[in-house]
Amino acid sequence: MKKVLTNLVLFIGAIIMIFPFYWMIILSTHSSQEIFSFPPPLLFGKNLLKNMEVLINTLPLIKNFINSCIVAFSSVVLVLFFCSMAGYAFAMYDFPGKNALFLILLASMMIPSIMTIVPWFIMMTQFGWVNKFWGLIIPGAANAFGIFWMRQYCETVVSKQLIEAAQIDGCPEFKLYFKIIMPILQPGMAALGIYTFINNWNNFMGPLLILKDPEYFTLPVALSALKGDPTRGYDYGVLMAGTMVAVIPILIIYILFSKYIIAGMTAGALKE
């Protein structure tokens, strides 16, 4: 009986989680008039091609899509490189000031990101990175959460005896890291990579502040331009079609690599 109730609760939870995505797809196939009719549409309509045509004619959609890919994938590569190395160093090596430095790192995670917006924008302006992707990619390349995540993961799965054995055999430090340690860290790095990709793909505030030229807009900023005629309001059918296009890459990434997220989350949960 307890198992049945558990499955029932999980099933209801899954329906609640999936329904917004289902309804977004449904609404992308209807016009705004149909969306605001009563009862609201719950089945596919016939307006998808028209909504997509308006979307493509209104926005440089492919360009915006490529811009989002550049920012998201570049951020993932840099975060995995720098955060994994920093996390590994914090977990496996002793050096002066290590604990104090890690406490500062943890403290920086307590600061709400919105409070750093103004200093970040001033720095990007002084660096000349306004209207450039560098301002979205470089500042987060060695972020506190990524270092903390990889440090915890390293402590869980990497053995100090393994490192000592490799060092005794004369293995150079960089070769030791890239040839021996990195393969062990793959599940944790995959989980961090997916988290970083989703964060950067959905980032709206940062690109909105420093990207001024529509040619450089990422998808979330470009979609915000779908305001339509002020006298008619938003064209919600087109807006939902654009949102669907923006969400599809995240769903594909999650479906392909979800096993790594689970592996990363559960690493160390069971110990002998």
Image (cartoon, grey):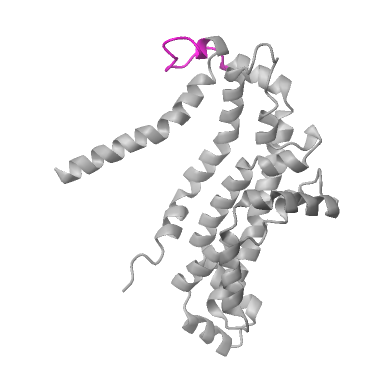
User: x, y percentage for residue 166?
Assistant: 55, 84
Q: Is residue 209 above or below residue 224?
A: below
**Residue positioned 69% across, 46% down in the render:** 71
Q: Is residue 7 left or right of residue 209?
A: left
In front of the other: 231 or 219 = 231
In front of the other: 212 or 133 = 212
User: x, y percentage for residue 141?
Assistant: 67, 58
User: x, y percentage for residue 96?
Assistant: 63, 84
Q: Of helix, strand and loop, which mostly describes the magenta segment?
A: loop
Q: Is residue 271 rendered magenta in the image?
A: no
Quarter of the image that includes the N terminus: top left
Q: Is residue 61 left or right of residue 248?
A: right
Q: Is residue 194 left or right of residue 230?
A: left
**Residue 107, picture quadrant:** bottom right
Instruction: Give the extent of the magenta segment.
Output: 34-48
Quarter of the image that includes the C terminus: bottom left
Q: Is residue 43 rendered magenta in the image?
A: yes
**Residue positioned 45% across, 29% down in the render:** 20
**Residue positioned 72% across, 25% down in the render:** 59
**Residue positioned 44% across, 14% down in the render:** 40
User: Is residue 179 among the parts visible in the rendering?
Assistant: no
In front of the other: 60 or 101 = 101
